[in-house]
Image: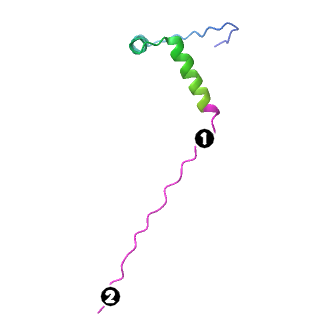
């Protein structure tokens, strides 16, 4: 898809129900599609530029065993 020099972004949503549900949810929150998109785009770009988080590998669990006395 070509990227023009205008400030517009055009998205052809094939799922009409998705479009309707999105507009409905945004209206319930008092948000516009433009504001939601700008906020979501900023968050997406911020997450991409942040260094990846390292997740510690789970450590094996060792259980002490008692030696039985042989009396």
Count of labels shown? Answer: 2
Q: Quadrant of residue 68?
A: bottom left
Secondary structure mostly seen in the magenta stretch: loop
Mark 2 highlights which residue? 69
Q: Quadrant of residue 7?
A: top right
Give the farthest residue toward the front: 30
For the point 43% across and 68% down, the residue is 62
Q: Magenta segment, which residues?
A: 48-71
- Secondary element type, mark 1: loop
For the point 61% across and 29% down, the residue is 46
Q: Nearer the viewer, residue 59 or 36?
A: 36
Q: Which mark is residue 52?
A: 1
Q: Is residue 27 above or below residue 61?
A: above
Residue 58 placement, left or right of 65: right
Give the farthest residue toward the right: 5
For the point 57% across and 17% down, the residue is 38
Q: Earlier in the sequence, mark 1 or mark 2?
A: 1
Q: Is residue 10 magenta?
A: no
Q: Nearer the viewer, residue 38 or 71?
A: 38
Estimate the x, y position of residue 4 in percent, counting from the top left.
Answer: 68, 9
Within-10-Å neighbours for mark 1: few <14, some 14–19, many 20+: few
Within-10-Å neighbours for mark 2: few <14, some 14–19, many 20+: few
């Amino acid at each position: 898809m070509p990227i023009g020099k205008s400030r517009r972004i055009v998205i052809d949503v094939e799922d009409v129900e998705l479009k309707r549900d999105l507009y409905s949810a945004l209206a319930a929150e008092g948000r516009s599609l433009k504001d939601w998109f700008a906020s979501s785009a900023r968050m997406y770009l911020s997450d991409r530029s942040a260094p990846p988080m390292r997740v510690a590998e789970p450590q094996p669990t060792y259980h002490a065993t008692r030696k039985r006395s042989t009396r």
